[in-house]
Image (cartoon, grey):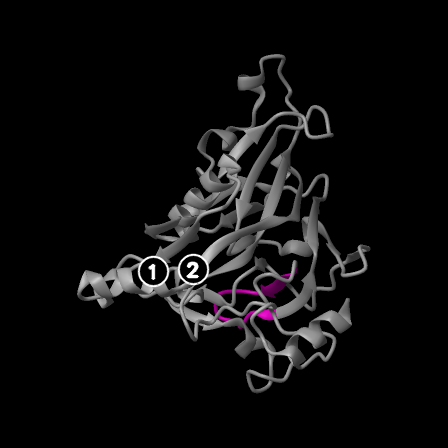
Amino acid sequence: MRIIVVGQDAVVNWILGVICDLKLPESPSIAPVPIPFYSSGIGASFGWKDILNKSPLQSLLLDVVLAKPWRTDSWHCFIRMKHSQSSTSQQGKPYSLNRIPQCLHEVGDVGKADNPTLYGRFWYEFRLDVPRNGLTSVAIVKVLNHLGQWKMLHMPGIINSICCLNLPMFDHTIHHRWVTKNTMEDGKTPKNPSFVPSFIDDGRLEVIGHKDWGSDWALLDQVRGIHFEFIEGAQGSAAYIIIDGGVNGMWHIPTNDLVEIEISYHGQVNILALPDCAAKSIHHSSQSSVSQANAKD
C-alpha cells in the first residue's frame, strides 16, 4: 500500500503516527507531498516538490509508483511536568497542558509517579528554544553515545536553541538549508573527524544548536538519545517546543513547569524517496560510507 499525504510536516507526523498505532503486519509507505507556499522538511528531504510543480497530475502519480520505500528512523519523546498540586487531576494540571499541540498526548504512569507526562513522536525534528537565559541556565543536557553511555553535552558559548534532527534538510526562517554546510568545510569533509555521515536509518540524531536567529547552527553531537533535566528554581524562562511542525506545532511553556524531556529511538517507518533526494540511507549508500559508519560503532 502506498499513501499520498499532501500537507505540511505536522500532517505527515499525524499520518505516520496513525500508521504506527495500527500496528499493521506490513507497514504502508507514504509519499510526503508538500503544499504550495509552506516549507516541508520531510517532503523536501525525500525529493518531493509541492503540487504546483507537478503538472499534470499523472506525473505525480507516476513518481509515487516508481519511488522507492526507504526505512526511516522513528523517535519518541516523553515530556514530564511538575506534579499535580490538587487532588482533582484536571485542576492540578499546569495551564499549558490545555493548549498543547496535537502531536503530543497525555499518557498514564510511565515509571515516575505524580508527574503528568506527555508523549509524542517525530521523524524530522524536535526543537527546544529557551531564548531568554540560554539552555545551560535552565537545563542539564545529557546525550546517549554509540556505546550506550550517557554523557554531558558540551555546548560552546551561549546556546539558546537545540534541534535534534533526523533528516538532512533543515528549515531556517523561510529557506531550507543543509546542516552539513554549517558543520563541514566543503560540504563533504567533516571538521570533526569523529563525526560520520548522517543517514536516516542509522539510529542516530544530529544535535545542532545556535545562539540566535542571526547565527549559524553548529553540529554539537551525534547521539542515540538525549535527556533534558530542568533545573529546580529556574524562574522567569519560557521554553518553546517544536515537533515536526514549525510554528504551527510550537508549544510555549514556562520552564519551571517542566521536569525532564527524554528522546529515544523507537523503530522505523516507510517513506517513499525519489532519485537523487537529499536523504541518504545507510543501506543504499556506497560500501565505503557504510564501512565508515560501522567503524564508529
Mark identifier at residue 272? 2
Q: Which residue is drawn at 64% across and 22% down?
A: 84
Mark identifier at residue 53? none
State which region is magenta: 204-218
The image quarter in which residue 91 lies: top right
N-terminal of the two: label 1 or label 2?
Answer: 1
- Residue 41 x, y percent position in the rendering: 43, 61
- For label 1, the crowd category at 10 Å Cα-Cα, with few meaning under 14, some 14 to 19 and many 20 or more, is many
285 over 56 or under it: above or below: below
Q: Tag 2's secondary structure? A: strand
Query: CA–CA distance between discs 1 and 2?
Result: 7 Å
- Residue 274 x, y percent position in the rendering: 40, 68
Q: Name the residue under label 1.
A: 64
- Residue 231 x, y percent position in the rendering: 72, 44
Residue 208 lies in magenta, yes or no? yes
Q: What residue type is labelled 2?
A: Leu
- Give yes or no for contact between labels 1 and 2 (Cβ–Cβ under 8 Å): yes
The image quarter in which residue 162 lies: bottom right
Q: Tag 1's secondary structure? A: helix
